[in-house]
Amino acid sequence: MQAFADPSIKGIFATIGGDDSIRLLPDLDLNVIRNNPKIFLGYSDNTISHLVCYKAGLTSFYGPSIMVEFAENSGMFPYMVQSLRKTLFSSEKIGEVKPDTDGWTVERLDWADPANQQIKRKLNPPTGWKFLQGHGVRRGHLMGGCIEVFDWARGTEIFPENWQDAILFLETSEEAPPPETVARTLRVLAAMGILSRLSGILFGRPGGEVPVEKFKAYDKAILQVVNQEEGLTDLPVITHMDFGHTSPMFVLPYGLQAGIDVESERFSILENAVTD
């Protein structure tokens, strides 16, 4: 609240994630956020803070944290730097977002060992994005976060209400919740009448130590609910995307209009996120 209220502060970048931002709710003043719009950037447990910002009418940014991504061993990943520049340092429309072609990692090096600061994390071969299903061109406002934390917000005053034509983005944490957890969460969203109102679903590459050969299990779980149980066969679903608990990542601005072109396999953010 102090950082939002201070006019000399232009942006707030989360240091890291965690698991207890939900405890902040009684101490937050939406009017302070609403009357002092500025950049808020972070992911994982910061999903709660993003939903607070959205409730206050502020576009915030689901993206890198200081200790993990900005402090990347041997320098930040170019893919992420490019996304940050296009999103936060330009007033132009963000435009098409493409898959990273250099590779990805979830390798964890002990931060307490100074020697590790000079060791680059090993990259796995790029997986590309997978367009699981859907037809045509769809557009809608972006909403979502880390699937575990997003679920914690259900029933609170900050849980989003405007789901008509939204594009839901979700990803799993470094705790690597199994595909069954993803399916159960989607079933709850279906029961709430949310899935049937969406324009699309974006799913990040599974976080944690999940072997590539098990990615298909998450795809299967998503299709089980969206396609087979709910019959939403035309709803675009993209998986294995470069956001969330794998590195590098691109930035997702809450509330901005995005577009999915299934036939050409393109995803774009259709607005600018900041102004001069």
Image (cartoon, rainbow, N blue to C red):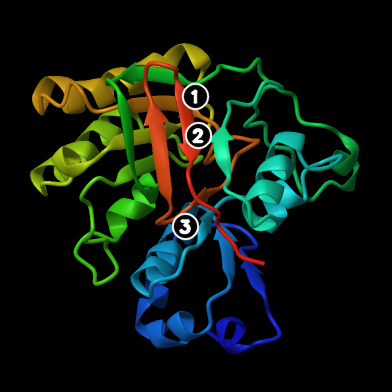
Mark 3–mark 2 CB contact (< 8 Å): no
- Cα distance, mark 1 to mark 2? 7 Å
Task: In this rendered view, identify the residue nearer to me: 213 or 222.
Answer: 222
If you read the primary sequence from the N terminus, does the residue marked by circle 3 or circle 1 appear first? 3
Q: Secondary structure at mark 1?
A: loop
Q: Is residue 250 left or right of residue 229?
A: right
Q: Secondary structure at mark 2?
A: loop
Mark 3–mark 1 CB contact (< 8 Å): no
Q: What residue is disc 1 on? A: 210
Q: Is residue 176 left or right of residue 3?
A: left
Q: Does 55 appear above or below 191?
A: below
Q: What residue is disc 2 on? A: 207
Mark 1–mark 2 CB contact (< 8 Å): yes
The amino acid on which the numbered mark 3 sits, given as a three-letter code, is Asp
Q: Position of residue 188 (x, y in %)?
A: 16, 44
Which class describes the residues within 10 Å of circle 3: few (<14), some (14-19), or many (20+)? many
Residue shown at 39%/70% (left/top)? Answer: 52
Q: Position of residue 271 (x, y in %)?
A: 50, 50
- Cα distance, mark 3 to mark 2? 14 Å
Q: Position of residue 152 (x, y in %)?
A: 30, 57
On the rendered image, what quadrant is the C terminus found in?
A: bottom right
Q: Is residue 147 left or right of residue 1?
A: left
Q: Does 201 appear above or below 100?
A: below
Q: Which mark is residue 7?
A: none
Residue shown at 87%/39% (left/top)? Answer: 74
Residue shown at 71%/49% (left/top)? Answer: 85
- Cα distance, mark 3 to mark 1? 20 Å
Q: Does 36 appear above or below 44?
A: below
If you read the primary sequence from the N terminus, does the residue marked by circle 3 or circle 2 appear first? 3
Q: Is residue 206 visible?
A: no
Q: What residue is disc 3 on? A: 45
Task: In this rendered view, identify the residue nearer to me: 27 or 52.
Answer: 52
